[in-house]
Image (spheres, grey):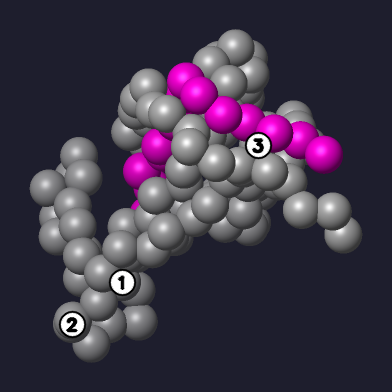
């Protein structure tokens, strides 16, 4: 059983949901690589509105077939494990915004399947 508690590092990658890696969503590739790297957890959150470097606002409120809504991938683990994963992100994300934040894990215990 894997446990994580105390000081940790959170990496957040801000993307658009239309960003691709070899014809599949970039956020999917990031989550799968984080899983393969054995990181404690990764989640994808879709925003309803936002803008990035282009300064173009993307929103779910407008009727559009190509909304390209904002997406955030959040990964949390021990600092050394997250930092070891960063070269893979460099390969994938190109122009995306990537942030690192120190955080405190209060409770995390892996479930056994």
CA gap, disc 1 and disc 3: 31 Å
Q: Is residue 100 visible?
A: no
Residue drawn where x is 20% and y is 39% of the image? 53
Q: How many numbered callouts?
A: 3
CA gap, disc 1 and disc 2: 8 Å
The answer to whether residue 101 is magenta is: no
Q: Indicate whether 33 appears above or below 31.
A: above
* Residue topped by disc 2: 62
Residue lying farthest to the bottom in this orientation? 63
What range of the chain is rendered magenta? Answer: 1-16
CA gap, disc 2 and disc 3: 36 Å
Rendered image: mark on residue 67: 1
Looking at the image, residue 27 sits to the left or right of residue 56; the answer is: right
Mark 1 and mark 2 lie on one chain; the one further toward the N terminus is: 2
The answer to whether residue 2 is magenta is: yes
Mark 1 and mark 3 lie on one chain; the one further toward the N terminus is: 3
Which SS does the magenta portion mostly show?
Answer: strand
Residue drawn where x is 65% and y is 36% of the image? 40
Kindly indicate whether the residue at mark 3 contacts the one at mark 2 (C-beta within 8 angstroms). no
């Amino acid at each position: 059983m894997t446990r994580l508690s105390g000081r940790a590092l959170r990496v957040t990658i801000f993307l658009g949901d239309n960003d691709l890696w070899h014809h599949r969503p970039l956020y999917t590739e990031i989550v799968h690589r984080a899983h393969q790297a054995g990181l404690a957890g990764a989640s994808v959150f879709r925003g309803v509105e936002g803008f990035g470097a282009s300064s173009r606002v993307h929103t779910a409120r407008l009727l559009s077939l190509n909304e390209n809504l904002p997406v955030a991938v959040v990964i949390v683990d021990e600092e050394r494990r997250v930092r070891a994963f960063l070269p893979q992100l460099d390969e994938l994300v190109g122009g995306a915004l990537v942030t690192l934040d120190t955080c405190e894990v209060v409770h995390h215990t892996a479930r056994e399947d």
